[in-house]
Amino acid sequence: MARYSQSEEDYLETLYLLQQENKVARVKDVAQALDVKMPSVVAAIRSLSEKGLVEQEKYGHIELTKEGIKVGKDVYKRHQLLYAFFHEVLGLDPEVSEEDACQMEHHLSPETRERLLRIVEYTRACKDDKVHFLKRFMYFVKTGEMPEPCSGCKKC
C-alpha cells in the first residue's frame, strides 16, 4: 500500500466513516467532522481525486474508490487497535486513548501493528487474568515498584 500523509489519511478515514454511517459524504459533512473550513476540504478532495482515491461530481457527493476504501478502512482499523490498547490494556481514560490513537495511527509499522493486535487479543481472551494483570500493572504505574509476588497465586 502506498504511503499517504497524515492529513490524507485523516480525510480518507473520515470519508470511510461517513460513508459507513450515511452511505454518502458531502464537503459540508467532512468539514464538520474534521473541524476544518470547506475550502480546505475542497482542496483535499481535489488532491485525493488526482491520486485516484475519491470521485466527486462537481458539487456532488464524495465517494471513495476501491483503493480509497481500502486505505480509509485500514486507517480506521489502526485507530481502533490503538484505542483498544491504550484503553483496555493500559487502562488510560477514553479521551486520552482517543487522542493518542488519532495521532499514532499514522505511524505504525506492520510489525508493531501485529504485536499490538496480539496483546489486545490476548488480554481480551484472558478475562480473569486481565483484571489481575491490570491491577498489578496499575500498581506498578502508580508506585514505580514491582508488586510483591502473590501468595499461592498461579497467575504470577
Image: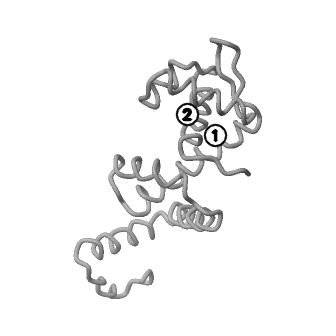
Q: Are marks 2 and 1 in contact (CB under 8 Å)?
A: yes
For this rendering, which residue is in front, 135 or 2? 2
User: Position of 69 compared to 5: left or right?
Assistant: right
Q: Residue at x 61, y 36 (%)?
A: 12
Query: Which quadrant of the structure image shows residue 58?
Result: top right
**SS at mark 1?**
helix
**Name of the residue lying farthest toward the top:** 59
**Name of the residue lying farthest toward the left:** 143
Query: Which quadrant of the structure image shows residue 118?
Result: bottom right
User: Position of 105 compared to 66: left or right?
Assistant: left
Q: Residue at x 65, y 32 (%)?
A: 47
**SS at mark 2?**
helix
Residue 40 vertical placement versus 119 (above, below): above
Q: Residue tagged by mark 2?
A: 14
- Colouring of the image: one colour
Query: Which quadrant of the structure image shows residue 115?
Result: bottom right
What type is the residue that disc 2 sits on?
Thr
Residue 114, image x and y in percent? Answer: 63, 64
Q: Earlier in the sequence, mark 2 or mark 1?
A: 2
Q: Residue at x 55, y 58 (%)?
A: 107
What type is the residue that disc 1 sits on?
Gly
Residue 38, image x and y in percent? Answer: 49, 21
For this rendering, which residue is in front, 56 or 144? 56
Q: CA distance from mark 2 to mark 1?
A: 7 Å
Residue 121, image x and y in percent? Answer: 57, 62
Residue 57, image x and y in percent? Answer: 70, 15
Q: Residue at x 71, y 42 (%)?
A: 70
Q: Residue tagged by mark 1?
A: 72
Residue 49 vertical placement versus 103 (above, below): above
